[in-house]
Image (cartoon, rainbow, N blue to C red):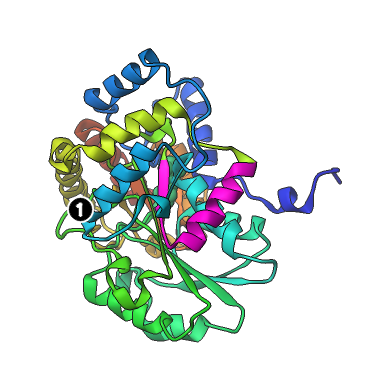
């Protein structure tokens, strides 16, 4: 027994980080590991954004910034919502945080009391469940499969609503599946939740700019539900700024004030220099950074083409983000003579050891049938990884 809080003892380490660490360790031991496990763009931050940060240092932006973010940044974010999403927000409806992750934590802490239920379609992004539990909430998962493009039906959502439901969380484009919801599907979710006036909707749009077939749609576009939608977004993925740690929310003033209050006690305002860099990122026309999306699209098509050539796994076509989430149940019960595969975690460990390719088990995302592979890496590594996986799969009988 340790002497730590139950809260911390219950907390699970992010499985994506654990897997990355293990593969780094193997790498350090001299193994040639190809990592398809990380959740960040392989681009460095565009130069104009870096330059804005250098200027901010030179201009002396080294003091505490306002808790919710610099006024010019909040204004620029509100303008971004108008320009890119046709959504009206005022600056005081925006709260800038230390990454979208902190934005999510602020929101959950603002609306969840112990025992409150949060509906989360599964597979889901790893941290949702842990953040909900930290707040004393109860995550209520809706299982979905590759056959329905990992989308829950209105009936499935309806069936999970109880008097204790306080929040619905989802991401589109989705990490880990790459699934994107169409305008009609979002409308249907909004209509399902609308009659239940106590339920907030957290719409995680952090992958907004990485889409392949159709433009991103936000559930906040429906006026009848907009007041209850909290958009979480940021510059980490679209502008390749994961290390700068800037995320933000757009929401009604009740929520933005609450997030300001929570953040004021935890971290205060996000890093001042990073905020100035983010100001450049959100004020710049997206077209300037679109080359990254185009590159992800090309690599998606490359990897899907290679995956089709490998028997056994079943996958959807990711419409956004930079992940594929194949169902690997075909391999369950199979063995290479030494290791028997019982679930997605076993398969990941097998591939790490045999193919020297690291992916993330679907278990981390609430799905024991799938694995997540990230195609945010070079063409050469994707080609080599698929060659090795094909050989390793072929050994499983
Ligand atoms: C769906 C989703 N939401 C939020 C985040 C957190 O973003 P940030 O790095 O800005 O904290 C991530 C990062 O992996 C993510 O995949």
Front residue of 224/48: it is 224
Secondary structure predominantly adopted by residues drawn in magenta? helix
Above or below, 213 against 380 in this view is below
Q: Position of residue 251 (x, y in %)?
A: 42, 60
Q: Is residue 78 left or right of residue 100?
A: left
Crowding at mark 1 (Cα within 10 Å: few <14, some 14-19, many 20+)? few
Front residue of 81/377: it is 81
Q: Is residue 254 magenta?
A: yes
Residue visible at 19% across and 43% down in the picture:
293
Q: Is residue 341 visible?
A: no
Above or below, 359 against 57 in this view is below
Q: Is residue 4 left or right of residue 79?
A: right
Rendered-image quadrant of the C terminus: bottom left
Residue visible at 24% across and 32% down in the picture:
378
Q: Position of residue 102 (x, y in %)?
A: 51, 46
Front residue of 224/217: it is 224
Q: Is residue 384 visible?
A: yes
Q: Position of residue 253 (x, y in %)?
A: 46, 60
Q: Position of residue 278 (x, y in %)?
A: 33, 34
Q: Is residue 168 magenta?
A: no
Element class at badge 1: helix
Q: Which residues are magenta?
A: 247-265
Residue beneath label 1, please? 84
């Amino acid at each position: 027994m340790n002497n730590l809080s139950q809260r911390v003892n219950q907390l699970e380490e992010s499985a994506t980080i654990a897997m990355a660490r293990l593969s780094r360790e193997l790498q350090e031991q001299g193994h040639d590991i190809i990592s398809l496990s990380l959740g960040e763009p392989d681009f460095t931050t565009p130069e104009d954004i870096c330059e804005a940060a250098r200027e901010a240092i030179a201009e002396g932006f080294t003091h505490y910034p306002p808790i919710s973010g610099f006024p010019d940044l909040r204004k620029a974010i509100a303008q971004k919502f108008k320009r890119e999403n046709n959504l009206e927000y005022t600056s005081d409806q925006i709260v800038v945080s230390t990454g979208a992750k902190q934005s999510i934590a602020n929101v959950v802490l603002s609306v969840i009391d112990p025992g409150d239920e949060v509906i989360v379609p599964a597979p889901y992004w790893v941290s949702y469940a842990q953040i909900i539990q930290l707040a004393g909430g109860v995550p209520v998962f809706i299982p979905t499969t590759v056959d329905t493009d990992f989308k829950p039906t209105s009936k499935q959502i309806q069936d999970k609503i109880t008097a204790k439901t306080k929040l619905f969380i989802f991401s589109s484009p989705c990490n880990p599946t790459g699934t994107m919801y169409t305008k009609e599907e979002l409308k249907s979710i909004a209509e399902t939740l609308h009659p239940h006036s106590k339920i907030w909707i957290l719409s995680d749009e952090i992958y907004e700019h990485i889409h392949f077939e159709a433009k991103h749609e936000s559930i906040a576009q429906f006026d009848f539900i907009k007041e209850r939608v909290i958009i979480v977004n940021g510059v980490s993925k679209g502008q390749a700024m994961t290390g700068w740690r800037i995320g933000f929310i757009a929401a009604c003033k009740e929520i933005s004030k609450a997030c300001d209050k929570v953040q004021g006690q935890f971290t205060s305002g996000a890093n001042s220099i990073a905020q100035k860099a983010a100001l450049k990122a959100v004020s710049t026309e997206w077209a300037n950074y679109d080359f990254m999306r185009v590159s992800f699209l090309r690599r998606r098509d490359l990897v899907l083409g290679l995956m089709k050539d490998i028997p056994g796994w079943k996958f959807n076509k990711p419409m956004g983000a930079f992940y594929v989430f194949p169902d690997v149940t075909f391999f369950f019960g199979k063995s290479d003579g030494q290791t028997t595969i019982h679930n997605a975690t076993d398969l990941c460990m097998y591939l790490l050891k045999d193919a020297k390719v690291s992916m993330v088990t679907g278990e981390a995302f609430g799905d024991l049938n799938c694995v997540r592979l990230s195609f945010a890496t070079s063409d050469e590594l994707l080609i080599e990884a698929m060659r090795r996986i094909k050989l390793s799969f072929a050994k499983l009988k």
